[in-house]
Amino acid sequence: MKKIILMRMAVMVGLIGLSAHALAENVQSLRGAALEENSTDAIVMQYQKDEEPIPRDYLQQPPLIPHQIAGYQVTIKHNKCLSCHSWSNYKAKGATKISQTHFENRDGAVMSNVSARRYFCSQCHVPQVDAEPLVENTFEPVDAMRH
Ligand code: HEC
Ligand code: HEC
């Protein structure tokens, strides 16, 4: 009996191995292109060191993040960004406090805590790397925003 079970297991392990091998060979995108063909190695970017706030280029721009955010987690239970940027913590941490818009829900009502739509900070705020622009950009800030 033991032998039969062992043999079945061996056959199963073999099958799993085979199918994983077959899958690896045929990984395709939804458009049908083989995924391995166009992939390039990931480039490890150097995020810029902590700096002063970066000037804004247009009204309503989410300010760029002038510091590193490696390891800063935002989960359903904990928001690392708010440990410095919330109204209760910003003074002690020397950070900018989130503005009142971060408390408004989509109907414009002001909540007593950060609105769910402003909870995932990096949806709008992004840290900076020293890299060539991916596309040419000739955007000029309006006069009122020139520094
Ligand atoms: C350890 C404290 C700390 C944490 C955690 C932190 N920040 Fe900051 N943040 C700062 C400080 C300090 C500044 C710069 C304030 C200054 O120099 O005026 C700053 C600046 C900023 C600014 C620029 C504000 C402006 O007016 O230009 C943004 C945007 C920002 N942080 C977003 C974030 C986000 C998003 C996270 C989470 C991913 C985060 N920060 C986590 C301390 C922190
Ligand atoms: C849906 C986009 C969005 C999300 C999500 C968001 N922000 Fe903002 N944030 C903005 C915009 C736009 C501004 C500039 C205009 C304003 O104050 O509303 C801003 C401004 C700020 C400022 C500068 C405030 C000031 O008085 O100049 C800080 C600091 C900041 N956000 C931090 C955060 C943190 C921390 C989170 C996460 C808890 C967060 N933001 C989530 C869009 C967003």
Image (cartoon, grey):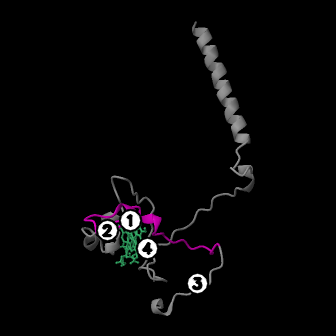
The three-letter amino acid code for the residue at tag 3 is Phe
The three-letter amino acid code for the residue at tag 4 is Asp
Give the Cα distance between marks 1 and 2.
8 Å
Q: Are the residues at dot 1 and dot 2 in contact (C-beta closer than 8 Å)? A: yes
The three-letter amino acid code for the residue at tag 1 is Arg
Q: Are the residues at dot 4 and dot 1 in contact (C-beta closer than 8 Å)? A: no
User: Mark 2 = which residue?
Assistant: 103
Mark toward the start of the polypeptide (2 vs 3): 2
User: Mark 4 = which residue?
Assistant: 50
User: Mark 1 = which residue?
Assistant: 118
Mark toward the start of the polypeptide (1 vs 2): 2
Give the Cα distance between marks 1 and 3.
26 Å
Discs 4/3, front: 3
Q: Which mark is residue 139?
A: 3
Magenta segment main secondary structure:
loop
Can you tell me whether the CB of the residue at mark 1 lies under 8 Å from the nearest atom of ligand 2?
Answer: yes
Label 1: few (<14), some (14–19) or many (≥20) C-alpha neighbours in 10 Å:
some
Mark toward the start of the polypeptide (2 vs 4): 4
112 in magenta = yes
130 in magenta = yes
Label 2: few (<14), some (14–19) or many (≥20) C-alpha neighbours in 10 Å:
many
Classify mark 4: helix, strand or loop.
loop
Give the Cα distance between marks 4 and 3.
25 Å
Q: Measuring 33% from the left and 52% from the top, which residue is drawn there?
A: 77
Classify mark 1: helix, strand or loop.
helix
